[in-house]
Image: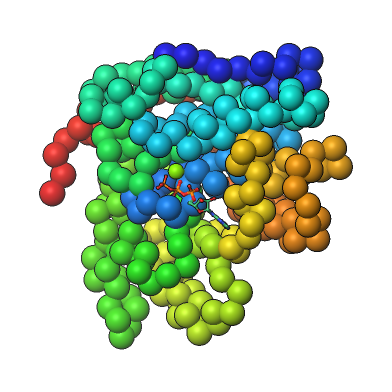
Amino acid sequence: MSIFNNPIKGALGPRHQRAAPGSSHGRARVIVVGNEKGGAGKSTVAALIATAMLYQGKRVSVIDLDLRQQSLSRLLANRRRWLPAAGVSAPMPLEYKLAEDPAMLADDPKAAAVLFHEAVDMAMTNSDLLIIDTPGSDTAVARAANLQADQIVTPMNDSFVDFDVLGVIDPVSLRLLRPSHYAQEILHARAVRAEHSRRLDWLVLRNRLAGADTNNRLRLEKAMSALSEDIGFRIGPSLRERVGYREMFPFGLTLADVAAKVKPGASAGARQAAREEVNALMASLQIPGPAPESTQPRRVLESPAAFEERP
Ligand SMILES: Nc1ncnc2c1ncn2[C@@H]1O[C@H](COP(=O)(O)OP(=O)(O)OP(=O)(O)O)[C@@H](O)[C@H]1O
Ligand SMILES: [Mg+2]
C-alpha cells in the first residue's frame, strides 16, 4: 500500500496537520460515496467533500475503491502536479492507495479487502474524516466499505431511469414496491453496524439537475420523498448541471478550491451559485466534530459479510 502525502510541504503541510476543533486522534468519521449506477457523480461529490472539508481545517484522508477507473485518484495526482507548477497553495488530503496499480486488485477481491481494511485502520488514526469513493458497480470491497461508513452519500442523476438504484416504485402511487439490490446492501450494512452500536446515516442527493425540467422534477421530488420514508434515507440538497463541477479536473481542483488566489478558469458569477450548492451539501452532512459514538478509539469493522453471496 502506498500513501501519497503533500508534496509541497511549506504550502500544505501545516494546514493538513492541524486537527479540527473538537476532534482528536483516532476518531475519523467515514463517508462512503456510493451508487451502483455509473456516472452518477460519485467521484465529483467525493472530491468536493474532501476539498471542502480541508478548508474547514479537517484532516482528510481518501481512498479510491474504483480500482479500475481511479478518477478520484487521478484528480489528486493532477492536484499534486498542478499546484506547485502554478505556484498555488491549497490543502491536500492524504491518499491511501491499496497498491501502486490498484487495477491489479480488481480481480482479487479478498486481497483488495485486506489492503482496504489496513488502509482504513491507518486513515482512522491519521485523520478526522475519511472519504471513500466507490465504483459504479457492486464489488466486494465496496460492500466492505459500506460496513465502515458512518455516512453513505449517494448522488443520483435527476431521472426516473436512475430511480431503480433505490428501488422499484409503483407508477401510480409512487410508493416502494421493493428496495433495489443496492438499497438492500445499505440496509444490511446498517443492520450489521447497529449490532455494534454504530449508526449509518444515508444521504441521497440528486445531481446534474437541468434548467427547465419542472414537471419531471416535481414528480421526482414526490417519489423521492415517499422512498425516503419507505427505505430510510435523508434527502440532501441537489447539484445542478454546471461546467464548474467538471472543468477543473485537469488542475485537480474543485469548486471548493475556488478563491481569490485559485482560479484556473473564468466565470466567477456562475461559480458563486455553485459554491452555494456546495455549502448546502456540506451543511447537510452535519459534521460538527467527532461522531457521537466516537468516544472510544475506533476499530475497523471486520467484514466477512461483504463476501457472502447475495441473491
Ligand atoms: N453537477 C454536475 N455538473 C456537470 N457535470 C457533472 C456534474 N456531476 C458530475 N459531472 C460530470 O459527469 C461525469 C460523471 O461524473 P463522475 O465521474 O463524478 O461520476 P461517477 O459516479 O464517479 O462515475 P463512475 O460510476 O464511472 O465512477 C464526469 O464527467 C463529471 O465531470
Ligand atoms: Mg467515479
In the image, ligand 2 is in what quadrant?
top left
- The residue shown at (47%, 29%) is 63
Say which of 196 and 49 sits in front: 49
- Tell me which corner region of the image, top left, top right, bottom left or bottom right, holds residue 156: bottom left
Question: Where 13 falls versus 146 (above or below)?
Answer: above
Say which of 208 and 197 sits in front: 208
Res 166 visible: yes
- The residue shown at (59%, 79%) is 212
Please state if 186 lies on the left or on the right of 155 as rendered: left
Please state if 179 lies on the left or on the right of 20 as rendered: left
- Tell me which corner region of the image, top left, top right, bottom left or bottom right, holds residue 90: top right
Say which of 81 and 167 sits in front: 81
Give how far across and how far down residue 191 sits, in percent.
31, 44
Please state if 141 lies on the left or on the right of 31 as rendered: left
Give how far across and how far down residue 198 sits, in percent.
42, 37
**Quadrant holding the N terminus:** top left
Residue pushed farthest right?
260
Res 144 visible: no
Please state if 43 lies on the left or on the right of 107 as rendered: right
Give how far across and how far down residue 196 sits, in percent.
35, 32
Give how far across and how far down residue 18 sits, in percent.
73, 21
- The residue shown at (49%, 21%) is 96
- The residue shown at (57%, 27%) is 77
Question: Where 145 falls versus 225 (above or below)?
Answer: above
